[in-house]
Image (cartoon, coloured by chain):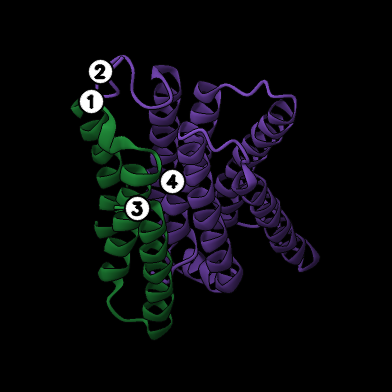
Amino acid sequence: MKNVYSWIILLLLSLLSIVLNNLQVAKYGIYLLFLLKFVLVAWHFMELKKAHIVWKITLFLIGISAYGLLFI
Amino acid sequence: MKANNFFYPPGGILIWIIVLVELTTFGIALGALHYFEHFEEIIFSNGRSQLNTVLGSINTMVLLTSGFLIADSVKCFAQKDKSLKKLRWASLLGVVFVVIKLAEYYQKFTNGIGITTNTFYSFYFMLTGFHLVHVLFGLSLLFYFIIKHKKHQLAFDDLEAGAIFWHLCDLIWLLIFPFLYLKS
């Protein structure tokens, strides 16, 4: 995926989370949107897709662990 | 060297070790925030409601756009397009982020809110303050790259590693923003 498409998706996800937050609905949906943005930035912008699988798994585990706190 | 070699991830192993250490550190801090929130739910809820979500959201989009421009700069540089116009725009957006953040702090200080106001604001100022320090360091790297580029001395490896650090700032913000700004 080209970086520009990732950027557009990231902005749309940001706008969606703002709208959802103001509506005070889908709290967990907003958290998932942020996790998705985290993955997109790491995968495409940081070129994690080109890195060894150990780096991929480690970064995803950290992100999922941090966001997982929001669900506790 | 293949990019998917464990010891040679994009940007180099050192910057990725830094990325993991920083994310883990901020993750632990967020865990502490989450823990303390259980004991002071009303204070945390009130604190969040006093934060400027509009400015925070604008900052989110500023950093995302800056990250996109940096990522594209690296790609262009690798493809021998040495103009790096996008790098300059990314740096400018970084400055915009800092200005907005300082405006938020000013808003708080003029309302008598500081790091010792309550537990929520201790976490708020510490988390966003440390993040701001990272952004300022990342900005200094970007300015350094712009200067080096003008002298035709910029190396791709340095630019790639610096870009990874800038994206780290983005990732940290994406982590702390929902914990601090979004209604619980």
Disc number lying in front (4 or 3)? 3
Amino acid at dot 1: His
For the N terminus of chain B, the quadrant is: top left
Q: Which residue is mark 2?
A: B5
Parent chain of label 4: B
Badges 2 and 4, same chain? yes
Q: Chain of mark 2?
A: B
- Residue B121, image x, y percentages: 59, 56
Report if the CB atoms under discs 2 and 1 are less than 8 Å apart.
yes
- Mark 1 packing: few (<14 Cα in 10 Å), some, or many (20+)? some
Task: Residue under label 4, please give it.
Answer: B171
Location of residue B24 by image quarter: top left
**Image chain in purple:** B
Same-chain status of marks 1 and 4 = no
Where does the image place residue B114, in percent across and percent down from the top left? 71, 55
The mark that comes first in sequence, 2 or 4, is: 2
Q: CA distance from mark 2 to mark 1?
A: 6 Å
* Residue indicated by mark 1: A52
Question: Dot 3: few (<14), some (14–19), or many (≥20) neighbours within 10 Å?
Answer: few
Asked whether disc 4 touches disc 3, contact meaning CB atoms under 8 Å apart, the reply is: no
